[in-house]
Image: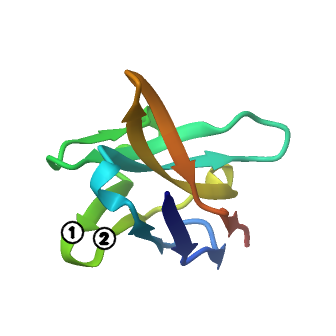
Amino acid sequence: QVQLVESGGGLVQPGGSLRLSCAASGSIFSISAMGWYRQAPGQERELVATITTGGSTNYADSVKRRFTISRDSAKNTVYLQMNSLKPEDAAVYYCSAEFWRGGLRNYHWGQGTQVTVSS
């Protein structure tokens, strides 16, 4: 099992910045990639950004050039630096850890952290 603990959410004004952190523990050797997803009220959970164990990154078009995903392998922690935040970025942000079992992709999820963008 993998445990994911997120932190760093909160209230920020439009144009502001926040940094989310996700610390992984447990069977971290099984993780092939980590990422951030978000879910706004009444909407489906959507991909924000991912980073593989090899360091390759992927971003949703809506956050490119504003958000940066990074990792500290020594701390088993993934970060999401969010700049130029917009009201539409407000959501619960979930950390994910991808692993493969029986040829199928699976995910562990964190508990989520709320990001509110409002003046």
Outermost residue on the right side: it is: 42
Pointer 1 with pointer 2, Cβ within 8 A:
yes
Label 2 Cα crowd, 10 Å radius (few <14 / some 14-19 / many 20+): few
Q: Quadrant of residue 82?
A: bottom left
Element under disc 2: loop
The residue that label 2 is drawn on is 76
**To which quarter of the image does residue 58 belong?**
top left
Most extreme residue toward the top is 103
Seen in the picture, residue 16 relative to 107 is either above or below; the reply is below
Of residue 60 and residue 79, the one placed in the foreground of this image is 79
Circle 1: residue type? Ser
Which residue position holds label 1?
A: 73
The way the protein has been coloured in the rendering is rainbow
Percent x, y for residue 118? 73, 68
Height in image: 46 above or below 91?
above
The residue at 38%/54% (across/down) is 66
Q: CA distance from mark 1 to mark 2?
A: 5 Å
Q: Amino acid at mark 2?
A: Asn
Q: Which residue is drawn at the image coordinates 66% and 38% (left, top)? A: 45
